[in-house]
Image (cartoon, grey):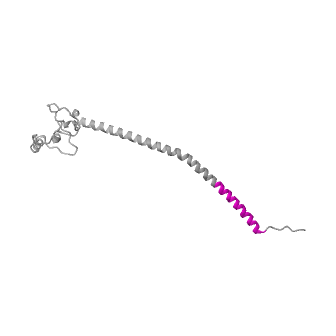
Amino acid sequence: MAKKKKPSVDNIVKKVNKEFEKTAAQIESLIHDALKQIEALQGQIQEPVKKLMKDLDGRREKEMKRVSDELERRLGEFQQGVMDRLGIAAKGDPESQPEPPAKSSPPSVKPPSPPGKRTQPAGKATASRAATAPKPKPKTETQPASKTAVNTDLTRIKGIGPVTAKK
C-alpha cells in the first residue's frame, strides 16, 4: 500500500501567493479600466459645464448692467423729484429753473414745540429774537454768480419755520 504524500506547507503557501498575485493583477486591471472610464465621463461632463458657466457669466454681466442702468435712471428721477419739490433747479438746466414765487407771503405757521421744552411768553420771545436776529445783507454786485440765492418758499417744507428759512 502506497502512502499518499501530504503537500508541504511551503507548496501551499506558494500556491496561495500565486493566486493572490493573479487576483491583485486582475483588480489593478479593473481599477485602471474604471479610472479611464471616469476620466472619459469627466471630459464629457466638463465641456458642457464650462459652456454653461461661460453662458451664465455672460448673462450675469448683462443683467448686472441692466440693473445698474435701471438704478441710475431711478436715482436720477428720484433726485430730480426731490429737487423739484424743494424748488431747486439743476445746475446748467435753464428749463428746470423754478418760476419766482408770487409776492404774497404765505401765512406764518409756527411748528409745535417739542415736548419737554418750555416756551417763553410770545411778547418777550418775539421781541428778543427780532432784536438779535441778523439782518440780511443787501445784495451787491460783488457777490459771485454761483452764490446767488434761489427764491423759494422753504417754509413749505415740514420742520422749517420762517426764522430757519431766513437763515
Residue 100: x and y in percent read: 17, 32
Tag count: 0
Closest to the observer, 75 or 31? 31
**Residue at position x 53%, y 47% from top?**
46
Task: Indicate the quadrant containing the C terminus: top left, top right, bottom left or bottom right.
Answer: top left
Which residue is depicted at the point 30% across and 38% down? 76
In magenta stretch: residue 26: yes
- Kindly indicate the quadrant of the structure image that contains residue 27: bottom right
Q: Quadrant of residue 118?
A: top left
Query: For this rendering, which residue is in front, 8 or 43?
Result: 43
Specify whether 96 is left or right of 21. Answer: left
- Please provide the residue range marked out in magenta: 8-31
Front-most of residues 22 and 88? 22
| Percent position of residue 101, x then y | 17, 32
Magenta-drawn stretch contains 110:
no
x then y, percent, for residue 39: 58, 51
Is 22 above or below relative to 166?
below
In the rendered view of the protein, which quadrant contains the N terminus? bottom right
Main secondary-structure element of the magenta-colored stretch: helix
Residue 28 horizontal side relative to residue 132, left or right: right
Residue 115 position by quadrant: top left
Coordinates of residue 37 in the picture (x, y in percent)? 61, 50
Relative to 159, does residue 9 appear above or below in the rendering? Answer: below
